[in-house]
Amino acid sequence: MEIAVETFDCLVLDLEGFADVFALTQKALGSSAKVGRLAVDDFFQLGVKEESEIGLVVFPVNGSADLMPFQVLVEKYRAEGANLSTLLIVDAQHTAAQMPVGSCCDDVICAEWPSAEHLIRMALRDHKLRSENRALKIFMDHSADGYWIWDLQRDIIEWSRRTAELVGIDKRQGPKNMEEFVALIHPLDQDRVDQAIKNHFLHHAPYRDVEMRLKRADGGYGYYVANGMALRNPHGMPVILVGSLSDRTLMQRVEQKLENTQKRFDILFHHMNDAAVLAEVETGLILEANQPSERLWGKSISQLVGSHQSELHPPALNEEARRAFEEHIAALMKNKRATIQVPIMRMNGEVVPAEISSSLIELDGKTRILGVFRDISDRVQADKDIRERDAQIQLSSHLSSIGTLAAGVAHEINNPLTYVLGNLEILKALTKENWTQNREIEELIDAALTGAGYVQEIVSDLKAISSRGEHEQASDPCEVIRIASRMVMADLKHRATLKLDLASSARVPLSSARMSQVILNILSNSGRAFNDTDLSKNRIHVSAKEVGDHLHVEVQDNGVGIAREDLDRIWTPFYTKNRRPGGTGLGLAISRRILMEVGGSIEIQSELGVGTTVHIKIPLLRETGSAENKPDSQSPANTALKRKPSLMVVDDNALILTLVAKILQQDFAVTTCLDARDALRQVDAGQTFDLVVSDIMMPNMSGKVFFSEMCRRGAYEDRFLFITAGSVTEDDLDFEQRMSDRGRVIHKPFQAAKFRDAAKELLLH
């Protein structure tokens, strides 16, 4: 039976416990995803075809369910090319611990877990990411070369369809693990291939141009070349090996036939698919070229013949390419065969990455160089996309973890810091009101206030620099530059002197986190630009000024500079010449992409021995003020209230409650509650309040829910003031942002005077 499973994002299997699991899944995914019911019989009769999209399938599990039939079915569907992910949602914690994660089950969630809804959303997100990668997989299945992935932790090998075609077998018959792959390798090549993999894993030696013979479906062996790269975890251990496989069988046969007869050489030379040229060893002059050469270089055979082989390449190869080419010629002279990747230049000036397989052959008693050229633009781009995608995923995960950690740290520090700062302010006021003047006591209190202020500044910087930025769409760039400069000073102060010249108060359409990512990348590069640590000579100057509708940021250093030939390559992902730890070669590429997304730009000028200047342009946000936002000419701090209004404070921290009561008791009749539920009971009993001050992050009932319940009971929305040490959950972050936009949020730690003013102002309006 065929049902339209592709119309759903998620399907819940109709097993025991379906209703509860279906409701939980719908609640977790909300309106952003379509959740459907899938009968067991329908699941067993799905009409699966190659590349079928089934989606995320949820299995409700009560007790010890027998999942073996489903495991067999899931494996069958996947073997037939279907794309599906599986998720078990169990009813109890002890059941979750017994559920295996394997070929049938991608993940297990307990419905009792507080994080169950979040984990369901993550499971659907992971499935969609895998689905997005299918386009790349289709490309790899239809490219000239084959591609493969080896998951070391699970010992699973996956071949692209093209890889299987190159070896002449059905994709489903390809090797599933390393043992099966080794069985395909010619016995005389197995040790060499094994050693190349070990050298790559243990010593970071390139896994490049590894020649091997693989057993084909007809029982014979074909000649292949493998290239790959290991993706490593944060500890440097390889977890995945990805790479490509090129069929060199034809080239191998060409070389063998060239050694036999001139006639065979002519036939193969002019009928091969790759471009080929024949040149003299002594002079480098091209003697012959085939028709694919005309297509590759955009020149006729008559134009190619008689020219020097150096004219096939760009006139100015960089130092790395020249050195590689010299090593290629040396290897060719030694082994009579060598392979290299070096760019070629077409007649229209276009530079194209190419792979050259060169051989020394004997023709008419003379030694000639046969070069077989292949355009590898698609392969290079695919490899680059895979590496950059993996790096971006790791970077996004890293930044998200930092943001979550920073929010949690800020919340935990800001609460105790609030009552430290608040009580110090109260103590200072008491010394002036009730004690005789004691300069030493006042100095001690001022010193403690200053130290606590430093802690407040550090926490604020950490929160701003690592903000997850879901809601923030703009930032003060000069403030971000100041914060970023403080963050890098721990390393920078030992290398160079930093000077800031910031002359702008405008905002730009970048969140603080993304703006700081750009500035930190640039400052880190500048800090690494010095070979010595002479602070009297080493200088970094950062300036920011408004020019028309843009902010111009300039970062200038007098470090070692960048070579002219490297200036165009520094924007290439993963390109780096930095020998110090920490450089990945992604910083500039990511910074440029961030700026381009908002219509900005980044340019670099540099000279060896003189220094480097980075020019950044970002469009400004022109914010127009309204009469509503203009401050009242009469400050609420100086406005005397005619009576003492009633005020209720709700916070789960007893010390914060006591502090707020002390701050406001002079102007308000203060009632305190440690639990929002107790506050609601007082309101239900008939008590009314002119103003309500509430924390946002509270364990039993959040500030958002409390606000909603109070409004439902008739409270005025504009008589609420919220205090927070920093929200952590997505729901509370969204609520905090909405209240902050309305001027209803005071961040901990707060100053007593500003807190009183805010409460009075809210009451007067």
Image (cartoon, helix red, strand yellow):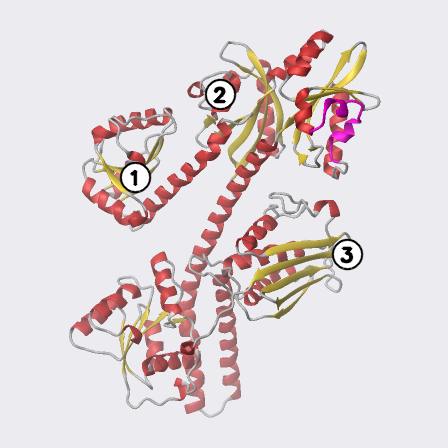
Q: Amino acid at mark 2?
A: Ala
Q: Which residues are magenta?
A: 298-314
Is residue 302 covered in magenta?
A: yes
Who's the residue at 39% across and 40% down the image? 128
Which quadrant of the view contains residue 7?
Answer: top left
Q: Earlier in the sequence, mark 2 or mark 1?
A: 1
Q: Secondary structure at mark 2?
A: helix
Is residue 66 covered in magenta?
A: no
Q: Secondary structure at mark 1?
A: loop
Of the 4 image quadrants, the one containing the N terminus is top left
From the image, tell me which residue sits under label 2: 164
Distance CA(mark 3)–CA(mark 2): 54 Å
Q: Is residue 301 above or below residue 107?
A: above
From the image, tell me which residue sits under label 1: 8
User: Of the residues tagged 3 and 2, which is closer to the observer?
Assistant: 2
Q: Could you say where residue 230 lies in the image, as x and y percent from the top left?
A: 55, 34
From the image, tell me which residue sits under label 3: 610
Distance CA(mark 3)–CA(mark 1): 61 Å
89 on left or right of 462? left
494 on left or right of 709? right
